[in-house]
Image (cartoon, rainbow, N blue to C red):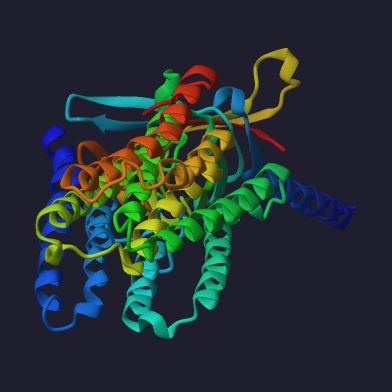
C-alpha cells in the first residue's frame, strides 16, 4: 500500500513536472490585430516622423522559467509600409528606401535572449533588410502572460511584450538622403501572441 | 540641403566633366590623337563621382539594383575605353554582337529578383528592355562613326537622360531622378564644350567615344531597368522614349549649308527633335497615369 502510494505520487509528480515544463516554453503565433511594428526617423532635423508596417507574420517561443531558451522570428512585408501619406509611402517603397519590389521581406531572427530584470530582457538577433543582415539588440519588457479574458477567444493563452531598438539604415545600404533624412531608424514594437 | 542637391546634381558633374575632358584633351591631342575619343569618357567618370557622393560606395558583390548600377557603369566605361584604344582592330560585327549579349545580361542581372519569379509582366519587361537597349545601342554606334554628326550620340543620350529623370520623378524614385539628371548635366557639359569647339576651334573637339557610350549608356540603361522592374513606371512610357533614337532620321542634315549658323543649328535642331518623344512621354504619363512622385 505504502509503495503504491509512493509510486502514485511519483507518477503524479512526474506528470506535474512534465506539465509545468510544457507550460514553461510555449510557442505563440503573432496576433497581427494586436501587434504594431512602428518606426521613427528624423526628418531634416525638424521632427521625428513615424510610420508602421501593416503586414507581417511571426512566432515566438517564450520560456518564462529560462528566458535564454526563448526565441523570436518575424517576417515583415516591406510594401506594407504606412506613414499615412500615399506619395511618401510610394517613395518609401521605391529603390530609394525599402525597395519593396526588389526586397519584399524584412526579417528578424533572435540569436540569444538574456534576462536584465524581473520582467525585462535583451534580445540579440539579426535583422535582414535590403538583402543585408546585421546584428540588432532589442530591449524587451514582458508585460503579461495569461488566458485571454474575452469569451470569444476560448481562453487561449496570450503573451504580450514591448520591444525597443534602433538600427542605422546606411548599414543596410539604405543611404539615400542621409544625413538630412535621419540615418537612425528607431523601432517601437508591441506584440501579442496566441499560443499555438 | 538645396545647395548640396545642386552641387551633387549640377556642380559636380559639370565641373568634373569639363576638367577631366580638358585633361584628356591635353594628354592626347598632340601625343596620341587617335585616343582623343577617350576624353568623352569624362561624362561616365563624372557620373560615378556623383553616384559615390549620393549613394556611397556600393558593396562588392552588390545586392540591390541601385548598387549594381555603379558596376554596370564602371564595366561599360572600362570596356568602352578598351574599344576606343583598340579602334579599328575590332570587328564592328563582333562589337555589336557582344553589345547585344551584354545588354541582355545587364537587364537579366538587374531584374533577376523579379525575373526569377517567372511573372509574365517581368519577362515581357526583360524582353522589351533587351530589344530596346540593343536598338538604342545600334543607333548610337552607327552615329558615333558618322563624321558629319559627331555630337549626335551625346544629344540622344542627353534627351534619354531627361526622359528617365522625368519618369523617375513621376514614379517615385528620387535617386533615379537625381542620377539621371546628373548624367544629363555631364553629357550637357561635354556637348556644350564640343558644340563651341566645333564652331570655333575644331582642334579642341573630341567625338563621343565608346568609353562614354558604354559607360554613360550603360548607366542610363541600368536606370531604365530599375524603373521598369522595381518602380511603378509604365512600360509604354519607356517605349515612347525609344523614339528619341529615331530623331537623327527625322532631322536629317537640316539645315543644309556649311556656314557657322547652319553648323550651329544642326545639333540644336536634332536636340529639339529628340525632345519631342520625351515631351510626349511626360505629357502622357501626366495625363494617363497615377503620379507617385517623391
Q: Along the line of sight, which residue is nearer the eye, B27 or B56?
A: B27
Instruction: Check the image and name the residue furthest to the top.
Output: A151
Seen from the viewer's position, the closer of residues A33 and A196 is A33
Q: Residue at x 50, y 53 (%)?
A: A110
User: Against B59, is B187 above or below?
Assistant: above
Residue A55 picture location, percent across and down: 58, 31
Res B104 visible: yes
Q: Is residue A163 visible?
A: no
- Where on the picture, by quarter, is residue A48? top left
Q: Position of residue B94 (x, y in %)?
A: 54, 77
Name the image quarter holding residue B266: top left
Q: Position of residue A33 (x, y in %)?
A: 60, 23
For the C terminus of chain A, give its image quadrant.
Answer: top right
Q: Is residue B55 above or below residue A159?
A: below
- In the picture, measured across the screen, residue B58 lies left or right of residue B284, that is left
Compared with A60, A51 (above or below) is above
Label tally: 0
What is the quadrant of residue B175 in the picture? top left
Q: Position of residue B264 (x, y in %)?
A: 21, 45
| Residue positioned 78% across, 49% down in the render | A15
Is residue B30 left or right of A37 when viewed as pictured? Answer: left
A152 horizontally vs B200: left or right: right
Camera-nearest residue between B53 and A138: B53
In-image side of A61 versus B42 (left or right):
right
Amino acid at each position: 500500500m505504502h509503495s503504491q502510494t509512493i509510486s502514485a505520487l511519483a507518477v503524479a509528480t512526474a506528470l506535474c513536472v512534465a506539465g509545468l515544463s510544457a507550460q514553461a516554453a510555449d510557442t505563440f503565433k503573432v496576433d497581427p490585430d494586436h501587434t504594431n511594428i512602428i518606426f521613427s526617423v528624423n526628418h531634416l532635423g525638424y521632427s521625428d516622423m513615424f510610420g508602421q508596417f501593416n503586414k507581417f507574420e511571426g512566432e515566438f517561443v517564450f520560456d518564462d522559467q529560462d528566458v535564454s531558451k526563448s526565441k523570436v522570428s518575424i517576417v515583415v512585408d516591406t510594401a506594407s509600409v504606412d506613414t499615412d501619406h500615399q506619395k511618401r509611402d510610394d517613395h518609401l517603397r521605391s529603390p530609394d528606401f525599402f525597395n519593396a519590389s526588389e526586397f519584399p521581406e524584412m526579417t528578424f531572427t533572435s540569436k540569444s535572449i538574456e534576462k536584465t530584470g524581473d520582467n525585462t530582457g535583451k534580445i540579440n538577433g539579426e535583422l535582414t533588410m535590403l538583402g543585408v543582415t546585421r546584428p540588432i539588440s532589442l530591449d524587451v519588457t514582458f508585460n503579461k502572460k495569461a488566458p485571454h479574458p474575452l469569451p470569444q477567444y476560448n481562453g487561449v493563452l496570450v503573451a504580450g511584450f514591448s520591444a525597443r531598438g534602433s538600427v542605422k539604415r546606411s548599414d543596410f545600404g539604405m543611404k539615400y538622403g542621409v544625413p538630412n533624412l535621419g540615418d537612425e531608424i528607431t523601432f517601437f514594437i508591441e506584440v501579442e501572441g496566441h499560443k499555438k | 540641403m538645396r545647395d548640396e542637391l545642386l552641387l551633387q546634381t549640377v556642380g559636380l558633374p559639370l565641373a568634373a566633366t569639363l576638367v577631366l575632358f580638358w585633361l584628356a584633351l591635353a594628354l592626347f591631342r598632340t601625343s596620341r590623337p587617335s585616343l582623343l575619343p577617350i576624353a568623352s569618357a569624362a561624362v561616365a567618370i563624372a557620373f560615378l563621382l556623383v553616384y559615390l557622393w549620393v549613394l556611397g560606395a556600393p558593396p562588392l558583390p552588390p545586392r540591390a539594383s541601385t548598387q549594381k548600377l555603379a558596376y554596370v557603369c564602371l564595366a561599360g566605361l572600362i570596356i568602352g575605353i578598351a574599344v576606343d584604344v583598340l579602334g579599328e582592330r575590332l570587328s564592328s560585327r563582333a562589337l555589336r554582337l557582344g553589345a547585344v549579349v551584354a545588354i541582355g545580361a545587364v537587364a537579366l542581372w538587374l531584374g533577376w529578383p523579379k525575373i526569377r519569379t517567372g511573372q509574365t509582366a517581368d519577362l515581357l519587361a526583360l524582353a522589351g528592355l533587351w530589344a530596346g537597349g540593343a536598338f538604342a545601342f545600334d543607333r548610337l554606334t552607327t552615329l558615333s562613326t558618322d563624321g558629319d554628326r559627331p555630337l549626335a550620340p551625346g544629344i540622344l543620350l542627353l534627351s534619354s537622360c531627361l526622359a528617365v529623370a522625368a519618369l523617375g520623378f513621376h514614379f517615385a524614385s528620387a535617386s533615379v531622378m537625381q542620377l539621371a539628371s546628373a548624367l544629363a548635366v555631364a553629357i550637357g557639359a561635354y556637348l556644350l564644350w564640343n558644340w563651341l569647339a566645333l564652331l570655333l576651334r575644331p582642334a579642341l573637339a573630341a567625338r563621343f567615344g565608346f568609353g562614354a557610350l558604354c559607360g554613360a549608356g550603360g548607366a542610363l540603361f541600368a536606370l531604365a531597368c530599375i524603373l521598369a522592374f522595381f518602380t511603378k513606371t509604365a512600360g509604354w512610357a519607356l517605349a515612347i522614349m525609344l523614339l528619341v533614337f529615331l530623331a537623327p532620321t527625322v532631322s536629317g542634315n537640316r539645315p543644309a549649308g556649311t556656314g557657322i549658323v547652319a553648323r550651329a543649328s544642326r545639333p540644336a535642331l536634332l536636340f529639339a527633335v529628340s525632345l519631342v518623344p520625351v515631351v510626349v512621354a511626360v505629357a502622357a504619363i501626366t495625363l494617363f497615369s497615377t503620379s507617385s512622385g517623391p
